[in-house]
Image (cartoon, rainbow, N blue to C red):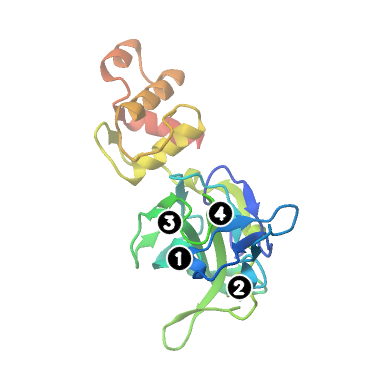
Amino acid sequence: MKLQLYYPIKPFIKYQNFGDNDACSQISTLPLAKRKIVAKKDGICPVGYEELYPLLGMKGHTGIDMFGGRGYPVYYCGPTGFVEEVQTEVERGLGVGIITNDKFEMEGGEYHAKTRYWHLMSYNVVKGQTVQTGDFIGLANSTGLSSGDHLHFELKPNIKNSMGVWYNVFQDNGYYGSVNPEPYFNKLYAQQAKRFDKNLEYGQSGSEVLRLQSILKEMGFFTYPLCTGFYGSETAKAVLAFQWKYKIINSWQYIFYGGRYFHEKTRNKLNNLL
C-alpha cells in the first residue's frame, strides 16, 4: 500500500521545498545556535551571511517549510503510529517524530514512515504514545535555527534492525535520511480526518477544544486571534454562530444556552461538513 500523508497544518503554504538552499547563517565566531538566520534575497545570501545547509553537512533542505503562524495547531498527518521521539535540536528546535505501525510503499521499497514536526512552541504528546491521523501534536513557532514562525516537516523511511533499533534507511543520502514528502500528500487536511466523538462544554480545556477552535476559525466562526484550547466565551460565541447558521438550535436555546454546549446535534453537523 502506498503511503498517504495529510497536510499537518492549514492552510498549506510552502516557504521552502525539499532540497532547496534558501537559508543563510550569519558569519560569526558565535556558536551556530546563536547566529541570526535569514532567507536569501534573489537567490543570494546578504552580505555577512553564508549558506546554512553546507554548515550542517547537508546537500540542501531536508523537508518542507510550510506556513505555521505562532501558536497554530499542528496535527499528525500519517497512518496510525507511535511517538518515537520528543526532543530539542540545535538546528530544528523543539520537535516530535512519529513512526507508523505498518510498512508502506515508499522510494522503491516497503518501509515504516517516520514523520517529523519541528520548530514547535510546545507539544501535546509523550514518547511511546499511540497516535492516529488528526491527533493534535503541538503548536507552531520558531525555535531552533529559524528566520521566522513556520512548521518544518520531514519524511524518513525507517526500519528496525536485528537489535530492535529504528534507523533511517537512506541516512547517507545527503539529507540525513529524509526524502521529498510532496509525492505522498493526498491534499486533505489532517484535522478534518478525525471525527468529533465526545461532547464539549463551557469550562473544558484540551486538545479537542483546540481542534474545535481551529476548525471553527477556518470556517469563519472563531474570530479570536489565538486558538487557546480553553472553552470560554469566545468559543461559546463561535459555537453559537455555527449552531444558528445551520438551524441546530431555536430562539429559546439561542438566548439561554449561548453556545455553551457542543453536543450530539452540533457534533454530527460539523462531522458531516468535515
From the image, state whether disc 3 or disc 4 is nearer to you: 4
Of 172 and 238, nearer the camera is: 172
Q: Between disc 4 and disc 1, whose residue precedes? A: 1
Q: Between disc 1 and disc 2, whose residue precedes? A: 2
Is residue 255 found left or right of 32 in the rendered image? left
Where does the image place residue 73, in percent across and percent down from the top left? 44, 46
What amino acid is at disc 1?
A: Gly
From the image, state whether disc 1 or disc 2 is nearer to you: 2
From the image, state whether disc 4 or disc 1 is nearer to you: 4
Q: Which mark is residue 55?
A: 2
| Quadrant in the picture for the N terminus | bottom right
Residue tagged 3: 132
Residue tagged 4: 147
Secondary element at tag 4: loop
What amino acid is at disc 4?
A: Ser
Q: Between disc 2 and disc 3, whose residue precedes? A: 2
Tell me how far mark 2 sits from mark 4, CA to CA: 16 Å
Q: Are marks 4 and 1 in contact (CB under 8 Å)?
A: no
Residue tagged 1: 97
Q: Between disc 2 and disc 4, whose residue precedes? A: 2
Residue in view at x 51 percent, y 78 percent:
159
Q: Between disc 3 and disc 4, whose residue precedes? A: 3
Dot 1 alpha-carbon crowd within 10 angstroms: few under 14, some 14 to 19, many 20 or more: many
Residue in view at x 55 percent, y 52 percent:
6
What amino acid is at disc 2?
A: Leu
Secondary element at tag 1: strand
Tell me how far mark 3 sits from mark 1, CA to CA: 13 Å
What amino acid is at disc 3?
A: Gln
Extreme residue toward the top, this view = 251
Tell me how far mark 1 sits from mark 2, CA to CA: 23 Å
Is residue 13 found left or right of 205 in the rendered image? right
Is residue 263 found left or right of 181 in the rendered image? left
